[in-house]
Amino acid sequence: MFLTLNVTPVLMLFSGINGSEKVQSKLNVVLIMLDDFRGGIGALGDKLAKTPNMDLLAQRSFYFPHVYASQALCAPSRNSMLTSRRPDTLLTYNFQHYWRTFVGNYTTLPQYFKENGYRTESVGKIFHHGPSSNKTDDFPYSWSNPTYIPSTQDYRNKPVCIGDDGNLRRNLICPVVVNLQPESTLPDIQVAKKAREFLNESHDKPFFLGVGFYKPHIPFKFPAEYLDQHDINNFKRDLIRPIDIPDVAWNPYNDLRERDDFKALNVSFPFGPVPSEFAAKIRQHYYASVTYVDDLIGGVLEFVDFSNTIVILTSDHAWSLGEHSAWSKFNESDHFAFSQYPRPGTFPSKSPDSDQPKLREIKIMGYSIRSKQFRYTAWIKFNSKKFKRNWRKIYGEELYDHSFDDDENINLAHRFGFEDIKNEFKQRLMQKFP
């Protein structure tokens, strides 16, 4: 859908042995993944971010600003990254299918290390838990031992947030007192503790450690004290939806609408808008979630021996914070070179869920291509039974010129004088995705 200047879906920070040093043995690898992280790091230009630990890592690392996610949804994006294959190759557009049994026995990144003498361990969310990784996080292929999933992750969708009426709710906005939570802890605190324990062990072989944090994914459940670093007045701004965006491109943020506090707002479906005061709270709590995870990352990095370890920091994709009145993920807004997103129909819907349609429900696929100056998207007919594309049936098009419109407020797809540019990009997409 929309690209915004502040949305960076994936960033990678490599920090490790100095390039002038002679490598005598295999280096350890620590892969840190955040969930729904926009890439907002203070040292990299986000003035609202409070991320001192990621700042320090960035200052001693290589930064790759143009690393692209292939689909803005956890399982397709993670499986694509970890197998180095696109969703159209894995035939994975949602959470229901495991590529090894559905398509092919493709090798993963940690599996490659494991097959070359490494001990591979997974703590938290590296693969998306569930059917898309065989309900095992791809153990035993990718990992030497079963993935550590924190026990408190069982409460992720439970009513553990104190509402305005004092009752426990399933809220979107959920700062907490940790000692009052189930088991007196939170999933990411458990993940960080387990990662530190592993790093503190003696190792008789090189290791690949995946550390997957669950935040800043919703709900925004984190220790309440992190709000103190984020003045809500810094997050107040009104953003409007451009009028020339095709309806098929819109994601109605159904995941937010399922939360009790959001339901109480009675936000108009599908376009909103979200009330300004609550919108500011969402932004504030998102940034506070990032600060919380940054603190935990710092605790993990204290146990890393940087003389023989490569550290990679990345995310699965980004998350919209009201740009063009859009929220959450499920769209084509992020900085994609080639990307795609499925839809069940031409207009946003709750059932089927147009944000997360099941395979049998997919009728349309949006394909995007990005150059240095332009981003073009075509929403075309898609046969989910035969996995066939029909470029003769286009339900919507988007074209944005970043030389004067970084925020993508003006859709040029049907403006006079842009036919040749649009057709050139369309031909490239047709060649890439016949």
Image: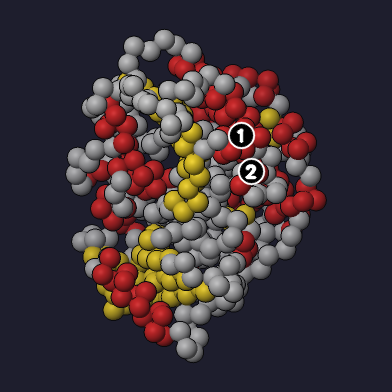
Q: Which residue is mark 1?
A: 56
Residue at 45% across, 84% down: 418
- Seen from the viewer's position, the closer of residues 314 and 24 is 24
Question: Sequence order check: which comes first, mark 1 or mark 2?
Answer: 2
Residue at 36% across, 25% down: 23
- The local crowd at label 1, few if under 14, some if 14 to 19, many if 20 or more residues have their Cα within 10 Å, is few
Q: What amino acid does circle 1 point to?
A: Leu
The C terminus lies in quadrant: bottom left
* Left or right: 235 as drawn, with respect to 401: right
**Residue 304 percent location from the top left of the image:** 50, 22
Q: How many marks?
A: 2
**Residue 250 percent location from the top left of the image:** 51, 65
Residue at 43% across, 71% down: 376
Q: Which residue is mark 2?
A: 43
- The local crowd at label 2, few if under 14, some if 14 to 19, many if 20 or more residues have their Cα within 10 Å, is some
- Seen from the viewer's position, the closer of residues 305 and 229 is 305
- Identify the disc placed on residue 198: none
For residue 169, above or below residue 200? below
Give how far apart the Cα atoms at labels 1 and 2 are: 8 Å
Q: What amino acid does circle 2 point to?
A: Ala
**Residue 85 seen in render:** yes
* Left or right: 299 as drawn, with respect to 315: right
